[in-house]
Amino acid sequence: MGVTLVRRIRARPEIVFDAFSTVEGLTSWWGPEDVPVISAEADVRIGGLFRVRFPTADGRIHECCGQFLEVRWPELIVMSWRWTEGGEAAEQGRTSRVELRLRPIDGGTELTLLHANLHGDASAQSHAGGWEGALQKLERAYTA
């Protein structure tokens, strides 16, 4: 199972790439609405690690982490993904894959996010909802 989302961001691919690959970028948009990221790490190189820790409005703590599998600045990031705390119960102990493709378009970037190898429909729907909210924050961050 997987989730595919496409968004148009009003920023060049280089800027959107940085939003996914720097601590400053990740902390500016990751997670649910009106809840700040607790901590983030990103070592963006093949084999480098990322980790993001954030709360949800109900006070639960979630932490995801993974390894960068492919990096082509400013057009592609592929990383493994697993929950180390919180997250979807069906995904505990499992590793999925997130792929971010950035394509220049008039007025900015077309972002295609694919989160693959999820365990079942309920998990895919839960992850789709999480990514939808986070990407809305990312879009707003670059709205004039």
Image (cartoon, helix red, strand yellow):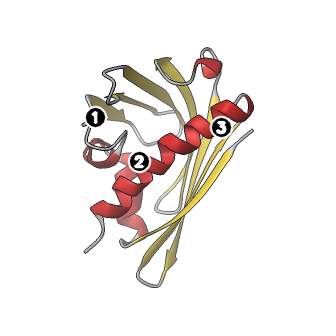
Q: Please state which amino acid type lies under the numbered disc 2.
A: Ala
- The percent position of residue 95, horizontal first and vertical second, equals 64, 25
Q: Is residue 55 left or right of residue 133?
A: left
How many angstroms separate mark 3 from mark 2 (CA)? Answer: 15 Å
Q: Residue at x 28, y 42 (%)?
A: 27
Give the quarter of the figure containing the C terminus. bottom left
Q: Please state which amino acid type lies under the numbered disc 1.
A: Val
Mark closer to the chain start, 3 or 2 = 3
Q: Residue at x 56, y 38 (%)?
A: 127
Q: Quadrant of residue 118?
A: top right
- 54 over 131 or under it: above or below: above
Between circles 3 and 1, the one closer to the viewer is 3
Q: Nearer the viewer, residue 58 or 94?
A: 58
Q: Residue at x 32, y 30 (%)?
A: 57
Q: Could you tell me if residue 142 is visible in this image?
A: yes
How many marks are shown on the rendered structure?
3
Q: Secondary structure at mark 2?
A: helix
What residue sits right under mark 2 in the picture?
A: 134
Q: Please state which amino acid type lies under the numbered disc 3.
A: Ala
Q: Nearer the viewer, residue 47 or 65?
A: 65
What residue sits right under mark 3 in the picture?
A: 124
Give the quarter of the figure containing the N terminus. top right
Mark closer to the chain start, 2 or 1 = 1
- The percent position of residue 21, horizontal first and vertical second, equals 39, 47
Mark closer to the chain start, 3 or 1 = 1
The answer to the question of whether label 3 and label 2 lie on touching residues, with beta carbons closer than 8 A, is no
What residue sits right under mark 1 in the picture?
A: 37
- Of the numbered discs in the image, which one, if any, rests on residue 19? none
Q: Secondary structure at mark 3?
A: helix
